[in-house]
Image (spheres, helix red, strand yellow):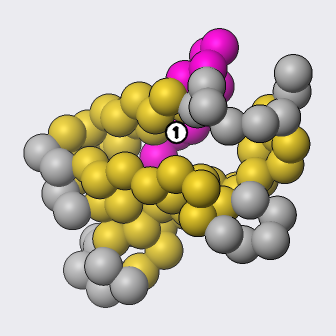
Amino acid sequence: CIMGFPDQSSVKPKVSLVGNTLNFGFSGVMNDVRIEMLDVSGKVVKSEMVNQSSVHSMDIAGLAAGVYLYRVSQGTEVISSDKLVIAE
């Protein structure tokens, strides 16, 4: 059990990029989850909260082409993070 998460695989989101929208799908309803986009220097360039939802869509149209890291966290616990490349 990780900080109240019964099984980490059940909270790790399925992530897909469709056009300028980054979609996060959770296996259950999530509360107080923060999704952040970080640039290569580690600076948070976009941040959104997920409350009472099992899906979330983030509009990334305003981000320049490049390499980013997305981070999904609840409180101080990082649920998931991965690299994302945005092409022109």
The amino acid pointed to by label 1 is Lys
Q: Quadrant of the C terminus?
A: top right
Q: Residue at x 31, y 85 (%)?
A: 3
Would you say residue 65 sits in the magenta stretch?
no
Q: Is residue 44 above or below residue 3?
A: above
- What residue is shown with label 1? 14
Extreme-top residue of the structure: 19
Q: How many marks?
A: 1
**Residue 54, horizontal then vertical, whole percent:** 26, 38
Magenta extent: 10-21
Extreme-left residue of the structure: 52
Q: Is residue 8 visible?
A: no
| Residue at disc 1, secondary structure | strand
The foreground one among 81 and 86 is: 86
Q: Is residue 60 above or below residue 66?
A: above
Q: Quadrant of the N terminus?
A: bottom left
The foreground one among 7 and 25 is: 25
Q: Is residue 26 visible?
A: yes
In the image, taking residue 60 as reference, residue 25 lies left or right, namely left
Q: Is residue 59 above or below residue 49?
A: above
